[in-house]
């Protein structure tokens, strides 16, 4: 939904409302004061910085816990001391500060939030004195020898170590299950033999089993006829195992009559006799003696030889079919091995991915694997800290800003000097613009230079108007004071908007920082996508790095 009132009207109402709220806050919420226990300390000594807040008992008071005391360093943050007086709270927050270089330093103003209002303390000055050492009285000691210290492993080495372990694990699994030559089991060795040799070996093993000692004549004849039937099934008639004795003998006679196999009548008769005797043993509880059983086993061995001699030579077509079958079987086994290897690799990858997700979170891993441009820009090393303009704005950015040619309107030529530095584009996760405009001082009737006051809020309004001209809609803005780490004050205009990118609206955020002195305006403009968490981190880092070069009276 587009805003129904103009940006200028919106800002005017906000300014009036802010002034009224500020006056009310001084009455309803209380007062803020700050103090230090000493105006001079020695290098490295602790300086106690106290902030006292007088506030209503229902108001929420928030003190900063960040390093906002630069150039001094916060080394301790003590608990809040609370006392109640006549219906209001008096809160005392103490910080321990220090500095390791001598000189005069200014503790910048600190932001305190009371309810929904923001207050700032006064800046304080402190002298850090060096420690004077009298080398004529202090005994000197020899330089201590070098000692070996344990180096901490960096994150990249930990990741490389994990990848190496996983690679070795995968290689070990593949070698053990697929690449190494595994010894064949006894059953696999027998299964790999040709049918004739397999049948002869099975007949030999009949003598090793103690069928007759255990009176297992039925089992003996079952195994004996199974050997014979399996051989006939593979080499003569493929339904020999499921055929009855009569059906099998009929089939053998038919094959003999058709000259498909050369078998004598005696051979077929012997096979029939042994099969029928085995049927009697299995179904009629017949019990042949040991000598007859041994004779039947020798007969089966002999007739298998006769069957082998009677088989026709395989034709060339049969040999080719057999070769094609073996090749197809080899390809099938190869495909099976490839699928198994792929399954193992995918499994290891999933386990590794799951481990990283548990350790770092899904979003972190996903953005790392997919090389999220915002994450890459945030983690780019090193960031560039540089000064832009004269007088300059010092800022840290992931990429060096490029100087842009600024076209000054004809009516402003000779009245203003403007330089601009940018990092912006459709593919960039964040847009950074720094503008520095220096106005030529006008002279009064006496010839003295006049100071030209600059309304920072009005300039920020002009930037928002420019956004609207480029198709930006739903602009929501707020204003607050902004203080750089080195104590320079400015105005921060920030909010959300729908930016038009390649003819489609993208929800985004913006910050417009304005700093002004007589005849000088400096601006930092930042825009980025609303839901980009890495862009939020970059913006925070950029804001914390901004410093303005303080002008001398002559430069002003």
Image: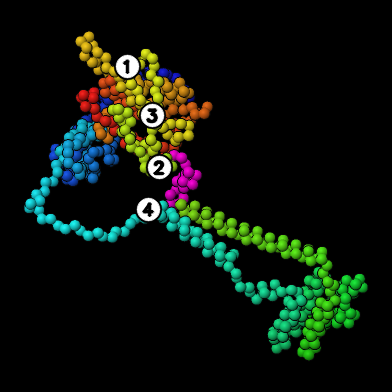
Q: Report whether residue 87 is seen.
A: no
* Disc 3 versus disc 2: nearer the observer: 3
Find residue 394 and report its horizontal and vertical position in percent: 31, 33
N-terminal label among 1 and 3: 3
Of helix, strand and loop, which one carries label 4? loop
Specify the label residue 154 is tagged with. 4
Dot 2: within a 10 Å radius of its alpha carbon, few (fewer than 14), some, or many (20 or more) residues?
few
Dot 4: within a 10 Å radius of its alpha carbon, few (fewer than 14), some, or many (20 or more) residues?
few
Residues at marks 3 and 2 touching, judged by CB atoms closer than 8 Å: no
Spatial CA distance of label 2 from label 4 is: 16 Å
Residue 388's image quarter?
A: top left
Residue 320's image quarter?
A: bottom right
N-terminal label among 4 and 3: 4
* Disc 4 versus disc 3: nearer the observer: 3
Find residue 515 and report its horizontal and vertical position in percent: 30, 26
Tell me if residue 364 is in the magenta stretch: yes
Tell me if residue 162 is in the magenta stretch: no
Q: Is residue 497 left or right of residue 347?
A: left
Find residue 312 and report its horizontal and vertical position in percent: 85, 72
Dot 1: within a 10 Å radius of its alpha carbon, few (fewer than 14), some, or many (20 or more) residues?
few
In this picture, which residue range is highlighted in magenta?
357-374
Instruction: Kindly identify the residue that appears in the image at 71 percent across and 82 percent down.
Output: 205
The vertical placement of 145 against 217, above or below, is: above
Residues at marks 1 and 2 touching, judged by CB atoms closer than 8 Å: no
Which residue extends farthest right? 257
Instruction: Kindly identify the residue that appears in the image at 40 percent across and 25 percent down.
Output: 405
Spatial CA distance of label 4 from label 3 is: 37 Å
Specify the label residue 380 is tagged with. 2
Instruction: Kindly identify the residue that appears in the image at 69 percent across and 63 percent down.
Output: 330
* Disc 1 versus disc 2: nearer the observer: 1
Magenta region, main secondary structure:
helix
Specify the label residue 403 is tagged with. 3
């Amino acid at each position: 939904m587009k805003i129904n009132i103009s940006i200028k009207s919106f800002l005017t109402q906000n300014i009036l409302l802010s002034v009224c709220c500020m006056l009310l806050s001084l009455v309803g919420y209380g007062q803020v004061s700050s103090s230090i226990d000493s105006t001079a300390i020695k290098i490295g000594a602790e300086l106690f910085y106290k902030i006292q807040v007088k506030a209503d008992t229902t108001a929420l008071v928030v003190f900063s816990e960040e390093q906002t005391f630069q150039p001094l360093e916060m080394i301790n943050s003590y608990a809040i001391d609370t006392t109640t007086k006549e219906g209001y709270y008096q809160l005392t927050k103490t910080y321990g500060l220090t500095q390791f270089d001598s000189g005069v330093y200014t503790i910048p103003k600190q932001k305190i939030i009371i309810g929904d209002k923001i207050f700032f303390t006064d800046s304080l000055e402190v002298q850090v004195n060096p420690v004077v050492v009298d080398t004529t009285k202090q005994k000197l000691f020899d330089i201590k020898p070098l000692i070996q210290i344990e180096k901490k492993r960096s994150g990249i080495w930990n990741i490389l170590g994990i990848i190496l372990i996983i690679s070795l694990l995968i290689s070990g699994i593949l070698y053990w299950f697929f690449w190494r030559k595994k010894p064949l089991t006894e059953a696999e060795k027998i299964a790999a033999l040709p049918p004739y040799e397999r049948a002869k070996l099975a007949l030999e093993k009949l003598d090793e089993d103690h069928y007759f000692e255990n009176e297992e004549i039925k089992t003996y004849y079952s195994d004996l006829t199974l050997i014979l039937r399996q051989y006939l099934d593979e080499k003569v008639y493929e339904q020999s195992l499921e055929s009855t004795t009569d059906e099998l003998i009929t089939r053998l006679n038919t094959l003999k009559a058709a000259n498909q196999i050369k078998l004598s009548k005696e051979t077929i008769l012997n096979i029939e006799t042994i099969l029928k005797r085995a049927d009697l043993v299995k179904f009629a509880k017949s019990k042949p003696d040991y000598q007859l059983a041994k004779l039947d086993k020798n007969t089966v061995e002999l007739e298998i030889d006769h069957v082998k001699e009677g088989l026709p030579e395989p034709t060339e077509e049969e040999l080719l079919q057999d070769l094609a079958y073996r090749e197809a079987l080899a390809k099938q086994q190869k495909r099976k091995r490839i699928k198994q290897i792929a399954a193992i690799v995918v499994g290891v990858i999933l386990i590794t991915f799951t481990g990283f997700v548990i350790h770092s979170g899904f979003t972190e891993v996903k953005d790392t694997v997919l090389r999220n441009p915002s994450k890459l820009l945030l983690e780019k090393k090193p960031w560039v800290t540089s000064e832009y303009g004269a007088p300059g704005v010092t800022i840290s950015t992931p990429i060096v800003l490029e100087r842009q040619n600024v076209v000054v309107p004809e009516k402003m030529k000779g009245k203003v000097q403007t330089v601009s530095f940018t990092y912006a584009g459709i593919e960039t996760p964040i847009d950074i613009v720094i503008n520095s405009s220096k106005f030529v001082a006008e002279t009064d009737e006496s010839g003295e230079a006049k100071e030209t006051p600059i309304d920072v809020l009005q300039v920020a309004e002009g930037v928002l108007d420019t956004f609207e001209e480029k198709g930006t809609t739903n602009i929501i803005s707020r204003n607050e004071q902004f203080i750089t780490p080195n104590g320079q004050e400015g105005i921060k205009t920030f909010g959300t908007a729908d930016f038009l990118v390649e003819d489609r609206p993208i929800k985004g955020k913006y910050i417009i920082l304005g700093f002004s002195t007589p005849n000088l305006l400096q601006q930092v403009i930042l825009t980025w996508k609303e839901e980009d968490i890495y862009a939020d981190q970059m913006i925070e880092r950029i804001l914390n790095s901004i410093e303005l070069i303080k002008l001398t009276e002559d430069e002003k």
